[in-house]
Image: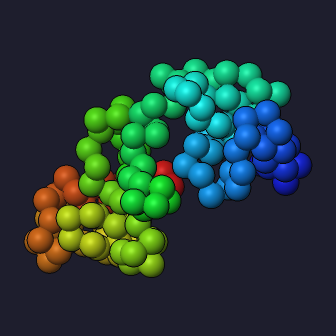
């Protein structure tokens, strides 16, 4: 998204909604190149002149972000196969685990390391055994690497 769109969103939030320091607030969302402002249960699309966005469309994505006590995003569980709010949360992106690289959360093994071993010709079962993972976790890590 353009810097102009970000500036416009900041100006709108301050002038019309009384929100200062919007970039530090959890109400600001970004989705598919659009800036959205979560306000009173509605998503206002700042990239499209304040149009209301369809909340149901983005709820599943918003539920996969874990916020810390200071309202900063702490962890993201990206979608791998199923794009519903209740899809498995096996893969995580967390700044405090593996320097923010995607990992299989249960063991802290990066998805890149797992995919690298599979790409080198190792069997899923062997990789799973070495890392004490379920074969389905190995497959999901490889799938994540392929689509990310």
**Image quadrant of residue 59?**
top left
Measuring 74% from the left and 22% from the top, which residue is drawn there? 51
Measuring 51% from the left and 31% from the top, which residue is drawn there? 58
Q: Is residue 114 shown left or right of residue 68?
A: left
> What percent of the width, then of the height, locates residue 119?
37, 69
Residue 34 in sight here: no
Residue 62, placed above or below residue 133? above
Q: Is residue 96 shown left or right of residue 132?
A: right
> What percent of the width, then of the height, locates residue 35?
70, 40
Q: Depth check: give the residue in front, 36 or 39.
A: 39
Measuring 28% from the left and 49% from the top, which residue is drawn there? 89
Q: Is residue 28 shown left or right of residue 117?
A: right
Colour approach in the figure: rainbow
Q: Depth check: give the residue in front, 119 or 108.
A: 108
> What percent of the width, then of the height, locates residue 69?
39, 60
> What percent of the width, then of the height, locates residue 57?
51, 25
Residue lying at the far front of the rendered structure: 18
Residue 29, placed above or below residue 56? below
Q: Is residue 7 shown left or right of residue 97?
A: right
**Image quadrant of residue 64?**
top left
């Amino acid at each position: 998204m353009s810097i102009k769109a970000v500036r416009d969103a900041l100006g709108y939030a301050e002038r019309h909604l009384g929100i200062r320091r919007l970039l530090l607030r959890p109400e600001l969302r970004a989705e598919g190149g659009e800036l959205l402002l979560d306000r009173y249960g509605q998503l206002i699309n700042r990239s499209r002149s304040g149009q209301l966005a369809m909340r149901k469309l983005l709820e599943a994505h918003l539920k996969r972000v874990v916020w810390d006590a200071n309202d900063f995003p702490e962890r993201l569980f990206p979608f791998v196969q199923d794009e519903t709010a209740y899809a498995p949360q096996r893969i995580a992106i967390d700044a405090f685990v593996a320097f923010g690289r995607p990992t299989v959360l249960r063991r802290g093994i990066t998805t890149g390391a797992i995919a690298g071993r599979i790409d080198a010709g190792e069997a899923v079962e062997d990789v799973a055994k070495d890392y004490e993972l379920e074969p389905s976790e190995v497959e999901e890590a490889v799938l994540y690497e392929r689509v990310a």
